[in-house]
Image (cartoon, rainbow, N blue to C red):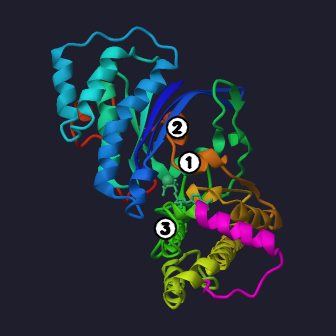
Amino acid sequence: MRILAIETSCDESSVALLQASTQDGRTSFVVEGVETHSQIDLHQAYGGVYPSLAKREHAKRLPHLLAKLCTSTKSTKSLPFDSIVVADIAKILEREPDALPAFIQFITTHERPSIDYIAVTNGPGLEPALWVGIAIAKALARVWAVPVVPIDHMEGHILSICVTHQENETQLSPVEEIRFPLLSLLISGGHTELVISESWRSYKKIGQTRDDAVGEAYDKVARMLGLPYPGGPQIALLAEQERALSPLPQKSIIDLPRPMRYTPDCDFSFSGLKTAVLYATQKMTPDDLLSARPAIAREFEDAVKDVLVAKVTRAMQTYTPRSSIVAGGVASNQFLRDHLQQVALAHGATMFFPTKQLATDNALMIAVTAFFAIQDGKKVYAYDSETCTSPEAIRANGGQVFQ
Ligand code: KG4
Ligand code: ZN
């Protein structure tokens, strides 16, 4: 099965082409291409993602990313299309004027790749951004007569462990090594969730943040420290340098809380931690703040680690998982990975992580998820059915999780 996937839920525009098959009970993938454009530079001035800018940028970039992706792959003969098709595309892309000219240019200059499905993230995420990907997916479905499958972004993060970025080589997926129950910790800019799967592709949320997501806390604290967006990698680097200078636990110049560490549930809260950093830094002069930055970063990361470790421990004690996955942008963090891995070892669970490239948002994880979802009988939307062109068929749903 060959899948073209599109991901636009936040500030990465990403497209991917994946070939997937299952033979003798083993799943293998060939990554034929991944093209991702990060909007980080654009949003840096705002210290976070600015939704209407994100939407426009996705619309401008996607046709060009598709052009890059589709030239580097084998193609079959393109479908002839006429003014009726062009009119349909104009209607489908009505709300994406920034995409239309480049999209028309793309389809007239590129042949249809030999794909069986188009996968697109339909939530959760920023709704205006999600709609761009969905509109482009529908327009491609119209031109190429390929069915579309809507994919949940969070399921994408979980299944991101099934593939690596390595292009044009057959890779055996570790998917068959997953044992159930499976505990997934999803830590990203928009989500902090613990999810239990008793069987393949079943998901039950057992805990979540009551306020800020952990990545959001990283980003906001980084901003208080005068570090650029996204703050996660910046704080991680400072904390790591500080730990390298003095490896033994230090009495920090600030003491930060570990919110909800001991509550008898699997929920999280990070807004108090963020506010504690705010109060501490407000009292400092700019010079003091600059020199205190590494110590604050270290103490903040220790606080995050303590809370995540406590909640994963609680979830492991309660649900005794045999496998575990830690995924989402914050899962790029090596310090957090090392500590969570220790928890898994202590509880006899095998822990899987995505490669660092695939921890942050990308279309490859959406393609992989689509493969498993389609095999599992998930509904796909064909272009020529009534539903695909109707706006009700595939909808962006900012808050939707696991549907
Ligand atoms: O999954 P993702 O790419 O996008 C969302 O779906 O939100 O996650 C982005 C988040 C940002 O908050 C970013 O600061 C954080 O992941 N992040 C990190 C690291 N790399 C990215 N946080 C901590 N340590 C890192 N190394
Ligand atoms: Zn994400």
Instruction: Bin the neighbour count of mark 1 within 10 Å (Cα to Cα): few under 14, some 14-19, many 20 and up.
Output: some
Is ligand 2 within 8 Å of the beta carbon of the residue shown at mark 2?
A: no
Query: Which residue in the protein does label 3 denote?
Result: 216
Q: Nearer the viewer, residue 267 or 56?
A: 56
Is ligand 1 within 8 Å of the beta carbon of the residue shown at mark 3?
A: yes
Circles 2 and 1: CB distance less than 8 Å? yes
Q: Is residue 249 magenta?
A: yes
Q: Position of residue 151 (x, y in %)?
A: 44, 43
Task: For mark 1, give the secondary structure.
Answer: loop
- Residue 121 vertical placement versus 337 (above, below): above
Q: Quadrant of the N terminus?
A: top right
Res 160 → quadrant: top right
Q: Position of residue 5 (x, y in %)?
A: 46, 34
Which quarter is ligand 1 in?
A: bottom right
* Residue interval drawn in magenta: 233-258
Task: For mark 2, give the secondary structure.
Answer: loop
Q: Position of residue 346 (x, y in %)?
A: 82, 67
Judged left or right of residue 33, residue 176 is right
The dot on residue 376 is 2
Mark toward the viewer: 3 or 2: 3
Instruction: Bin the neighbour count of mark 3 within 10 Å (Cα to Cα): few under 14, some 14-19, many 20 and up.
Output: many
- Residue 96 vertical placement versus 45 (above, below): above
Residue found at x 43% / y 48%: 39
Is residue 116 among what the camera can see?
no
Nearest to N terminus: mark 2 or mark 1:
1
Q: CA distance from mark 2 to mark 1?
A: 8 Å
- How many badges with numbers are in the image? 3
Query: Which residue in the protein does label 1 denote?
Result: 201
Q: Amino acid at mark 1?
A: Arg
Q: Is residue 177 magenta?
A: no
